[in-house]
Image (tube, rainbow, N blue to C red):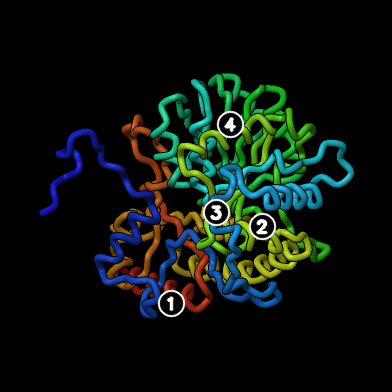
Amino acid sequence: MMEPLDSIPGFRSVPRTGVIYVTHEATRHGFAYGKDDWANLGQGSPETGSLPGAPQRVESLAVSASSLQYAPVAGSRALCQAVADLYNARYRRGKKSQYTADNVSIASGGRLALTRLASALGNINMGHFIPDYTAYEELLGVFKAFSAIPILLRPEKGYKIAPADLREEILGRGLSALLASNPCNPTGQFMEGPELAAWCALGRECQCSMIFDEFYSHYIYPKHPDSKPRMISAAEFVEDVNKDPIVVVDGLTKNWRYPGWRISWTLGPKPVIEAIASAGSFLDGGANHPFQNAALPLLDPAHVEQESMAIQSHFGSKRAKLLERLEAMNITPDAKPDGAFYVWANLSKLPPPLNDGMQFFREGLKEKVIVVPGVFFDVNPGHRRAQSRYNNYCRISFGPEMGKLELGLDALERVIAKYR
């Protein structure tokens, strides 16, 4: 029998994130990736195969002799410039202030990019929202230089906060930085246009660094009225790229559907980029060199637009299917997801014990379907709060292929039928 970690001097028990926890539990019930009879509606990744109308997928790459060496900690210069060029072309046409390679840092995935940022923060109050991405909990708790301050998003307000109310939170709580996923994981709500511009203006006015996790920023529904892809970024509302306290994190994981590549970027003022590159020098040493080279053609604006159009059409169909089937099961979201690929499902209308997210998850395993209990999105760094929220919720993903989505929904129907 394995000894508990707290019996080993100097170590602490480290919790698993929600997705890792449910996958681990499912594995104990026979789940394995590639098994045809299981449906993982808890997954945090999109399907990675070809989609109608999308560019051809990259399935092989050549490794040059030079890329066998370490890449620069901040990322290859060519990829940094390609990221800057994409944001300038997409969001900053006609603006005097333009991003350059010095405004970009490359990392091995989104969590590492956020870890670099967190390690570079000072002794400040750092705001975050509830509910939000499960991995934020440990990220915001492990670094002791800053204090994580929660801000509750209320269902009756559609899990959104008005700029005027946000201003009060920033000033009243003395926040020097704020972390937000946009679109939000798990609720699928997002900010764009004047609302997002107001948030960026608050960052300048209140001297509060706004850190936007934009990994789902190409998953926007419904379609644009002129049949163009809808993509959002705070980069559109930055006045001075080197002075505005606006930081954007994104990467190939979701919006390009290459999660296995583990390539992300941080876009922000040059001093911030220099700080997180210094953090990367002791945290990780830099991202995979061959995959940075392979990423270059994927950042061509025409490629990005074609991929985004395909995503929004295909995932929009899966979204509609999921919402329709859940409604028939008496499972409803407090606010329909207009972004990302999740439904934040309210289970309160289901009979006990299915109205509890953890019990719903465990009953689902018996029918070979995985969801994520809502309690994992009650971001609680250091577990300073005793009360637990979102017991009556779960997150259901429409990231998998349509066939797997329907397989999982059939399984959820069987779960509910047992208690009717």
Closer-to-camera residue (99/30): 99
Dot 2: within a 10 Å radius of its alpha carbon, few (fewer than 14), some, or many (20 or more) residues?
many
Residue 5 percent location from the top left of the image: 20, 43
Whether residues under marks 3 and 1 lie with C-beta atoms below 8 angstroms apart, the answer is no
Closer-to-camera residue (184/153): 184
Helix, strand or loop at label 4? It is helix
Q: Earlier in the sequence, mark 4 or mark 3?
A: 3
Helix, strand or loop at label 2? It is loop
Q: Nearer the viewer, mark 2 or mark 4?
A: 4
User: What residue sits right under mark 2 in the picture?
Assistant: 218
- What numbered label is drawn on residue 69? 3
Q: Is residue 25 left or right of residue 9?
A: right
User: What residue sits right under mark 4 in the picture?
Assistant: 275
User: Quadrant where the C terminus lies?
Assistant: bottom left
Dot 1: within a 10 Å radius of its alpha carbon, few (fewer than 14), some, or many (20 or more) residues?
some
User: Quadrant where the N terminus lies?
Assistant: bottom left
